[in-house]
Image (tube, grey):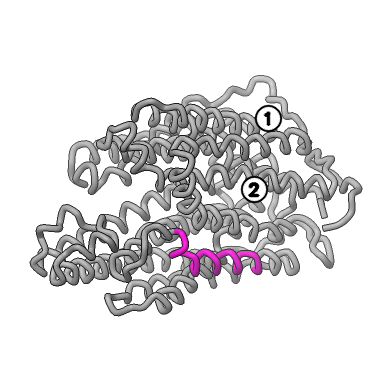
Amino acid sequence: MTGTAPSKQTAGEPETQRSVRVVLLALMIAMLLAMLDNMIIGTAMPTIVGELGGLEHLSWVVTAYTLATAASTPIWGKLGDMYGRKGVFLTSIVIFLIGSALSGMAQDMGQLIGFRTVQGLGAGGLMVGVMAIIGDLIPPRERGKYQGMMAGVMALAMIGGPLVGGTITDHWGWRWSFYINLPLGAVALAMVTAVLHLPKKRRAAGTRIDFLGAALLTVGITAIVLVTTWGGTEYAWGSATVVGLAVGGALALAAFLYVETRASDPIMPLHIFRGRNFTLMSLIGFVTGFVMFGAVLYLPIFQQSVQGASATNSGLLLLPMLLSMMVVSLVVGRVTTSTGKYKAFPIAGGALMIAGLFLLSTMDTGTGRLLSGVYMALLGAGMGFLMQITMLVAQNSVEMKDMGVASSSTTLFRTLGSSFGVAVMGALFTSRVQDEMASRGGSGLTERTAQLDAASLAELPEALREAYQHAVAAGTHSAFLVGSAVAVVGFVLAFFVKEVALRGAGPATAEKPADEGTAKVAETV
């Protein structure tokens, strides 16, 4: 990307090429804030509990953040469409930083949970704001260049988060796990304020914010996330609490769909789902989230419990998967930009995910780290084909005025997929481990399954240690086998994707939008 003259504009973008680069850097910092937070906090949690107490409420420190992020994502997307991206995005950064500062000052577990909720509200706006602003600034045909950056930020957060969290906690104290967000956020805030120039939007006379739709969607999403978080852990799957949440969530979502068909300006306009590609990419994004976060959670457990790896380097354990994901995503982005073609990528991604997950399901106590690393790299390559292409095609399938809700809806589907993935794979893993331990005479450890690291295992009698390792390998087999079955769904859906020309000129010729009603986007390169 070269040159400093403002590009041809539609959608009101007076950005030079250099300005676009600076904005993208600021957006990457903002995305890193949202993604890095949970990774850092996870490492600091034992120290936090030691100082604040409230061990019984520990899970809520993460759950409150996740709930607030998921529930607020669609609302942030719609507000950006209505009032303009810049102001809404800056507001989300400020809210995130306020939540970070308050979390660092928390005096008890109740305060920390409440302040983490504030943080999560801001994080929802950060994620969807980054995607929507990039959707405004960069035409889909050129946007593929930045897919590798997105995957790189994700890989950096997953690898560096636990290491950074441990270092900060050991040397500065756990409160700096939150305070570290403040200088990074201030940089992003200043850069976006100074460089990003997008048109202000005015709400059309007579339109009203869809408060009822927003409330029903929030209730429905909250219920779903709580069901997947609590089911089989805090409460039995058949308990009144879980069943009640499931029924209540289903009713809220049904009511939401009814309200959206009648709202003058719905929080999530259902017409965006009429496009085949948008619906398919939302569903494929759900599958990708299901697979990815399940793998991120249970691969380290296998490597620590069966292969004897150190928990301190848990982020590095995923390096083969994350590096291959980043590299493939970068290559896919470049190829998409140069050719304008993309249908083969979700098909290839689905096939590689199935293969990678199936091979991971074959691991046992004799599987070495090199072989498991190869399997992880294969899975990572599959996800690299899918991680950003789903957002790219989804955004290309809607009009510019719906860019925010399209970005937030796709993000929401991936978030819900991750919740279901962790819940379903976790239930199968735990059940299989407990059954195997009971059959091998290790029932005394049943209550502690999936909680033993390499150091704890070394203290067990040899027979009990071997029984536990075989049980974890069996649990991993079940979890990844169901993951591969879910990946088959994404693979099949990919064949129905229609190759619609991406908006924006490529290196050779400008291509005309093929979707009816799509708005022309400014060329920025």
Q: Residue at x 32, y 66 (%)?
A: 302
Dot 2 crowding, Cα within 10 Å, few <14, some 14–19, many 20+:
some
Front one among 88 and 211: 88
Against 473, residue 13 (above or below) is above
**Location of the C terminus (image quadrant):** bottom right
Residue 300 appears in view = yes
If you read the primary sequence from the N terminus, does the residue marked by circle 2 or circle 1 appear first?
A: 2
Amino acid tagged 2 = Met
Tag 1 secondary structure: helix
Magenta highlight on residue 258: no
Q: Disc 2 and disc 1: Cα gap in Å?
A: 18 Å
- Residues drawn in magenta: 315-331
Seen as rendered, the residue at the extreme right is 5
Q: Residue at x 39, y 32 (%)?
A: 219
Residue 87: give its label: 1
The spot of residue 228 in percent (x, y) is 32, 46
Task: Give the side of residue 310 with respect to residue 75, left or right.
Answer: left
The spot of residue 379 in percent (x, y) is 47, 69
The spot of residue 229 in percent (x, y) is 32, 44
The spot of residue 214 in percent (x, y) is 48, 30
